[in-house]
Image: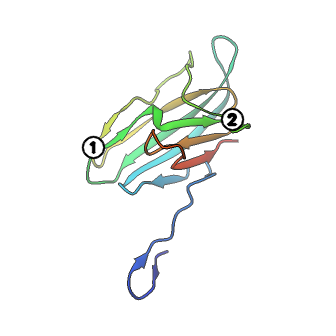
Amino acid sequence: MPIDNGFLILKEEQPTTDLAVGTTVTTAAGLSVVVDSVQTGLTNYDGSTMTGIHVTYVNNGDEGADYNVYDWKGEDANGAQQNQGYYSEGSEELQSGTLAAGGTVAGNIYFDGDIKKALYFANMFDKSATASWVLA
């Protein structure tokens, strides 16, 4: 709820860390991102464990917004962060591109191992995540 201090309206910061799956985060540019669902315990072709997430982007801004599978990292219980992995049974995987104003795109991202958090980076060169979701 905005706070009116008599001079300007201040918006309360929305929490962006350790979010529940299904919670949407909106960037300053108007791009909304959400981890819609999680698939744990997937088995890859070599018997290794994989974790899948389904994400959705909605561009509520006035200009195009980029989206990319490299906007996302998975974090394990030890705090190690990794980019997507190859899952032989993967489907509807998130691609990369530009989302027009008013547009939406969704897809799956797969990570090696048992991932505990999904991290979203509005800028893939940032060291700190813009938002994070707890997966388990």
Q: Residues within 10 Å of mark 1 (few under 14, many from 20)?
A: some
Q: Position of residue 73 (x, y in %)?
A: 56, 36
Q: CA distance from mark 1 to mark 2?
A: 33 Å
Q: Are marks 1 and 2 in contact (CB under 8 Å)?
A: no
Camera-side residue: 56 or 97? 97
From this view, report whether residue 51 is shown above or below residue 59.
above
From this view, report whether residue 38 is shown above or below residue 110.
below
Report the residue at 64% width, 41% height from top: 117
Determine which quarter of the picture holds residue 65: top left
**What is the quadrant of the C terminus in the image?**
top right
Report the residue at 38% width, 81% height from top: 8
User: Which three-letter amino acid code belongs to the residue tagged 1?
Assistant: Ala
For label 2, the SS is loop
For label 1, the SS is loop
Check the image and name the residue furthest to the right.
Answer: 78
- Nearer the N terminus, badge 1 or badge 2? 2
Which circle marks residue 100 in the picture?
1
From this view, report whether residue 117 is shown above or below residue 8.
above
Report the residue at 70% width, 30% height from top: 114
Q: How many marks?
A: 2
Q: Position of residue 11 (x, y in %)?
A: 45, 71
Which circle marks residue 7 in the picture?
none
Q: Left or right: 125 with respect to 19?
A: left
Q: Left or right: 102 with respect to 120?
A: left
Foreground disc of the pair 1, 2? 2
Report the residue at 40% width, 78% height from top: 9
Q: Left or right: 103 with respect to 115?
A: left
Which circle marks residue 76 in the picture?
2
